Image (spheres, grey):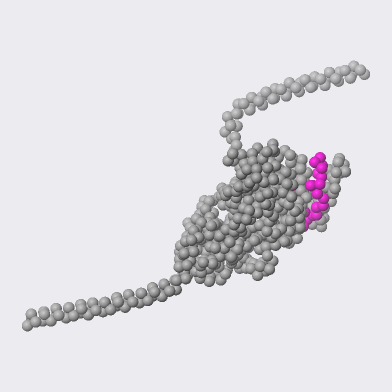
Amino acid sequence: MKKNYFALILFAFFILISNECIFSQNADSLSAAVVSDSSAVDSVVNKVPEAPLKIGDVADGNKSIPIHLIKLYDENRFTIEKNENHPLPFSTKQTCGDCHTYSKIKNGTHFSIDQKDSTKRNGEPFIYTNHRALTLLPLSYRGWKGTINPDSVGITPFLFVKKFGSHFTGGNISENEELEKPENFLRWEISGKLEVNCLVCHDANSAYDQADFAAQIRNENFKWASTSASNLANVKGSAAKMPNNFDPYNTNTYVDLDLRSTSPPTVFYDETKFDHDNKVFFDITKNINKERCLFCHTTTLNNDEEKYLAEQEDVHITAGMSCVNCHSNGMSHDIIKGYSEEYLDKNKSQLHSFSCEGCHLTSIDNSIVGRNGAPKPLHKGIPPIHFEKLSCTVCHSSYMPSDKAKMVKTSRAHKLGVPGANKMALTYPLIQSPVFVRAENGKIEPRNLIWPSYWAVKNNNEIKALEIEFVENNIQPKLELDTTYNFGNGPQVADSTLIKVFNSFNHSDLLSGNLVFITGGRIYELEDSTKIKSSEYEAAEPYTWAIAHNVRPAQQSLGVNGCDDCHSLNSNFNFSEVAIISGVDDKSNSTISMVNFEGLDSIYQSLFSLSFYFRPFLKFILIFSAFVITAVFLSFSFSGIKNVSKYFSNVSSLNNDKEI
């Protein structure tokens, strides 16, 4: 018996040695093959083959919407069944990506917020506010002038999604592993990725709940958010309250159970939504309901009474159009923005017809004019120079200007539509609109405006914004501002408070330079240990972004009352006041005239406007002078004709005399 065991051991050892030799030979052969083909490998380095088209990438020409009766897949591409125990949320990447190329879609305008904007045309930033630290930061990864990259102030992609994901459609920033920070690795594993949320636009079901999507983001239930917002399931629990070692694939994890204050994220599917093949129906549409767009793209007045009287629907919407009639896209989801130079920036002449000018006035390279029955305005009596110096939106978009720029709220900045949003009239951030600004193309256009406010470190001539965590932990306690004061005209601190804060950091090892405060268009720093000095600073200038809605009808356009709408001494177009929002109570000018943003000279505009008072009298003089000149001209003309006639009569008489 022992001999048999010994023989078996020898046989096994022999087999092992044989396999080692074979593996070694195969490895050597494989290595040689790799080396021999190294030139071929080098020729295709960094060349990623384009993903093949899928059935849903190209339409067959039929303009009806295909029925979307499909199976749900989780992130691991396992089918979700209605009787499944502890199911995972469905993945849009796997479910929608079964027919549509996800890698193409996720680079679309709404999903690729982590990518630079080649047009350099400022858009609405994500605004970080902390009134207790006197901080307001316009954030963007796009590289827009005047914005701050979130990474530079310690806002990691995970923190960014948590803070701003309520009004973000998901995509690259939460899926690109190269952007992840090591300190957030475990939290990403628990919360999952916030994939492109196709349903936020394309689900026509009125039960789709965007507010619930925002609530899931607040709970860090990133990969559960789309499922919960749909009408297919409910999600309970919070990933934010799970310990770092929580396993989302095993909800029975008992490690650190005592640290939990709530249940883990759990999805409960409505079994009645599944048919006998475990398929569910999605009511998909390409004609996106304006309500879906407005959840993220609303701008509204702060004052409810003024809102009731002044706000109205965009003229295009009242005409029966939808947002996507102008702001459409192809498979790439590169949304058409509709500004006048877009066709140049993207080198596509067809895009000109989606701008105001291209749709209503002129064509370029045979682009379509008059989309959707757009009328052609006559603009009678308006000198052509107006169209060279002003954008269409100056006269036709946003609110009519008043003696002071209005305070407005936006969905993204004020979390509008999200449960718990602050409904007070003046709520941070304080955004002013419309402010008429001279754009990069030389034309004046209406914009929204905010004043950045943040703490920074100054080392020689280099100034760098401090990370928000440092400000919250170190500077905020020293300001001693009311923790419940989160509305009104804005908190301010006196010079004495600034001096105390500056002195506590300028002589410590916490900073590599001197502490400075940037707010209200100025930079504040210590001149000596007892005195503050301030100066204008380019990075402290207000950040503005163009607005084009709501479009008003022609009867309500700027200038409908005549030239005086703009060319008068009390014109709100030129001389409206824009408030300077500062965190320092320095008793300096609190407003700035609109003309400064327009790049115009206030004295010249005043004198030019003054000339309009005398224009009726000048017109009378011109008419009278024209009448006199005409009368003189006719008088001399008749006299000349008489003399010429007399001359020819005399000549004729002389000729007759000679003949006789």
Q: Residue furthest left?
A: 660
Residue extending farthest front: 530
Q: Position of residue 514 (x, y in %)?
A: 64, 41
- Tell me which residue sits at (38%, 73%) in the image: 622
Task: Name which residue lies at 57% across and 63% down.
Answer: 576
Q: Which residues are magenta?
A: 222-248
x and y percentages locating residue 115 in the rendered image: 62, 46
Is residue 121 part of the magenta span, yes or no? no
Position of residue 22 in the picture relative to residue 40 (left or right): right
Residue 192 visible in the shown view: yes
Q: Residue furthest bottom?
A: 660
What's the residue at 81%, 40% (across, down)?
A: 245
Which image quarter: residue 623? Answer: bottom left
Residue furthest right in the image? 1
Residue 205 located left or right of residue 346: right
Position of the N terminus, as image quadrant, is top right
Query: Is residue 85 visible from the viewing direction of this image?
Result: no
Residue 13 position within the rendered picture, expressed as x and y whole percent measured from the top left = 81, 20
**Split into 4 quadrants, where in the image is the C terminus?**
bottom left
Tally of numbered discs: 0
Query: Considering depth in this image, is 302 or 300 the residue closer to the camera?
Result: 302
- Residue 244 is covered by the magenta coloring: yes
- Residue at 62% in and 53% down: 520
Which of the pair 101/266 is nearer the observer? 266
Lateral position of residue 462 relative to residue 633, left or right: right
Q: Position of residue 379 (x, y in %)?
A: 49, 68
Q: Nearer the viewer, residue 391 or 622?
A: 622
